[in-house]
Amino acid sequence: IINILIATIPTAIIGYGLKERTEVWTQNPVVVGYFLIVTSIILYLSDKARAGKNFGTAQAFLVGIVQGIAVLPGISRSGATISVSLLAGISREKAAEFSFLLGIPAIMGAALLHIKDIEAISRDMMDIYLWGMLVAFISGLISIHVVLKFVQRAKLTGLAIYCLLAGIAAVWCL
């Protein structure tokens, strides 16, 4: 819990600081493509890492910095946080577990920043939004389970290649 709190501090500061820039860059597929290429490099490098270190406050703070940067479009939050944890010498299992636990305060914080927009939703549309939230929650739980199993058993190079190709396509085709 302490490591999550430590990691949340830089995440909040960086994420909030990049908020306006992110909203602009999200609209530009070429920028998203370049950040997908960055994601592919991070994923590829993490497969070369060796586990063996304990997870301490310094690693938690580093992962928090990376999670803050991961608000940029095309940077995978879980991919970046898991990869940097692996590069810091953390085991695959602990890296994935910490990444998903760390996502909880980050996602809640982002939701709080947008809570003011809820009044723009008409009452007629509220049921649709609530069903969407439920489906997102269920699919998120399933995704977490799948990714945890994947990270524990497989290399991230395949995902790195996918991100690289998607990034190149976005940059080249637009």
Image (cartoon, grey):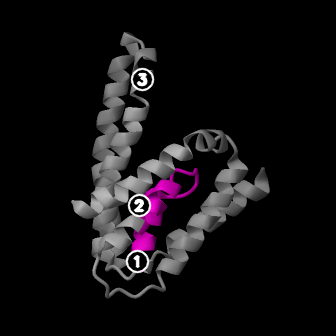
Q: Identify the residue under disc 2.
A: 64
C-alpha separation, residue under disc 2 versus residue under disc 3: 26 Å
Q: Would residue 145 be visible to someone looking at this image?
A: no
- Along the polypeptide, which appears first: circle 2 or circle 1? 2
Q: Position of residue 143 (x, y in %)?
A: 34, 55
Q: Residues within 10 Å of mark 2 (few under 14, many from 20)?
A: many
- Asked whether, in this view, residue 37 is left or right of residue 16, the answer is right
Residue 147 x, y percent position in the rendering = 35, 64
Q: What is the distance, in whole Å, between disc 1 and disc 3 at their CAs?
A: 37 Å
User: What residue is at 43 percent from the left and 56 percent from the top?
Assistant: 10
Name the side, left or right, on which 37 lies relative to 128: right
Disc 1 residue type?
A: Leu
Asked if marks 2 and 1 touch (Cβ < 8 Å), the reply is: no
Quadrant placement of the N terminus: bottom left
Of 170 and 84, the residue lying toward us: 84
Q: Residue at x 78, y 58 (%)?
A: 172
Residue matched to label 1: 86
Magenta range: 62-86
Residue ID at (78%, 50%): 174
Name the residue carrying label 3.
Answer: 116
Whether 101 is drawn above or below 97: the answer is above
Task: Tell us which disc is closer to us: 2 or 1.
Answer: 2
